[in-house]
Amino acid sequence: MSNVLLLTSGRESPADILPSLSLLPHAIRVAPTAVESVISGPAPDAVLVDARRDLALARRVLMTLRGTASAVPVIAIVTDGGWAAVSADWGADDLILHTAGPAEVEARLRLAIGRRSLEAAQLPDEIRSSGLVVNEATYSARMNGRSLDLTFKEFELLKFLAQHPGRVFSRAQLLQEVWGYDYFGGTRTVDVHVRRLRAKLGAENEALIGTVRNVGYRFVPVKTGGGRGTDGTVSEASADGEGQDGALGDSDGSQSDAAAARGQRAMAHADR
């Protein structure tokens, strides 16, 4: 028996939304169609999203859940018309017609839960690189043994970059992957979070997040010989590449603070 969370914007019972559920031995919990329903309550084994009527709302929630990198499989319940409307970028693990029989519903739940379990077993709980340790299970990060006090989005951004060492991501890509499809803020948000991450990593480690001019950011591991794992074009990005986001100032738009921060970083680089 699995614990299944059913998200719906209506007042119908699970048997009205997906009749076959009443014939299966799963524990069903019903909650409003919102991401908060998934992350605030007891952790479910699978999430069913009622997409029979409000496809726009279902799409928004599915994309947001995908952006949180949740390990819980998400299945959308659709009508015949909705079946044709859903695409891969919605982020659902599977689709199921609301008229599906109990054998099909059981099989889709079992396979979706099984796939996610296998993926979770293959992924390490910790990401280690260049003295940085990111623990996904405890949502904690350490730099050379020093605990980093990160906000949720700072942690998610650092984790995502560390998971893809050397790969360059544009600000728009980072917004999509870390903040989700339904985030309407500008790319300045990414610059602000990168600047805060660098400050928390410390002057001697801030180059772990390299700036690629006119493109975006990437995680730059330190070589075992003590040099930075850069290719030369990005090794100076943390200094002069900072001009893109440094010019923005702090989150309150302070230019003087940004200039002071650049001066401190320049001195730190000179000392090295």
Image (spheres, helix red, strand yellow):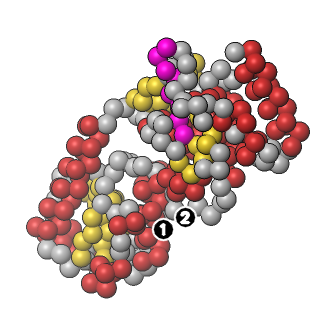
Residue closer to the observer: 2 or 73:
73
The kind of residue on which mark 1 rests is Arg
- In the shown orientation, is residue 247 left or right of residue 94? right
Residue closer to the observer: 143 or 49:
143
Residue 98 placement (x, y as % from top left):
25, 77
The outermost residue toward the front is 232
Q: Residues within 10 Å of mark 2 (few under 14, many from 20)?
A: some
- Is residue 133 in sight in this rendering? no
The outermost residue toward the bottom is 81
Q: Residues within 10 Å of mark 1 (few under 14, many from 20)?
A: some
Looking at the image, residue 251 lies above or below residue 225: below
Q: Quadrant of residue 4?
A: bottom left
Residue 271 placement (x, y as % from top left):
74, 14
Position of the C terminus, as image quadrant, is top right
Q: Residue drawn 33% across and 51% down?
A: 72
Residue 110 placement (x, y as % from top left):
17, 55
Q: Residue drawn 76% across and 18% down?
A: 270
Q: Quadrant of residue 85?
A: bottom left
Residue closer to the observer: 244 or 189:
244
The residue singled out by tag 2 in the image is 182
- In the shown orientation, is residue 244 left or right of residue 184? right
Looking at the image, residue 100 lies above or below residue 187: below
Q: Secondary structure at mark 1?
A: helix
Residue closer to the observer: 55 or 15:
55
Q: Main secondary structure of the magenta part?
A: loop
Separation of disc 2 and disc 1 at Cα? 6 Å
The outermost residue toward the left is 103
The kind of residue on which mark 2 rests is Asp
Magenta stretch bounds: 218-225
The residue singled out by tag 1 in the image is 60
